[in-house]
Image: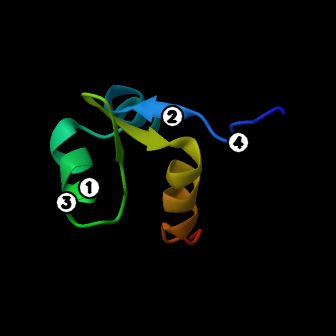
Amino acid sequence: MTTTIATRLLSLEETRRLLGIGNTKLFELLKTGQLSARKLGARTVIAESELIRFQQQLPQVRGQ
């Protein structure tokens, strides 16, 4: 039997860099539930699919 993992797990540092935000903003997003994380042993990780979901729910900027 073969098991496929459908999504990558990102460290908090990777997530922060991909979003272009600082630690304070990342922890605010986690605290308010806008972004969810999981524990993997001592590490906190964010599924790539969760990051995509978060990005898709951000409001669009309208052109001028």
Whether residues under marks 1 and 3 lie with C-beta atoms below 8 angstroms apart, the answer is yes
Of badges 3 and 2, nearer the viewer stands 2
What's the coloring here? rainbow
Viewer can see residue 19: no
Quickly name the residue at label 4. 6
Number of the label disc, if any, that sits on residue 9: 2
Q: Is the C-beta separation of discs 4 and 1 under 8 Å?
A: no
- Element type where label 4 sits in the image: loop
Tell me: residue 51, above or below residue 11.
below
Horizontal relation, residue 8 to residue 30: left or right: right
> Mark 4 and mark 3: span between their CA atoms?
26 Å
N-terminal-most mark, 4 or 3: 4
Camera-nearest residue between 17 and 44: 44
Place of residue 47 in the rendered image (x, y in percent of width and height, measured from the top left): 51, 44
Q: In which quarter of the image is the C terminus?
A: bottom right
Residue type at mark 3 is Lys
Could you tell whether 12 is left or right of 8 in the image?
left
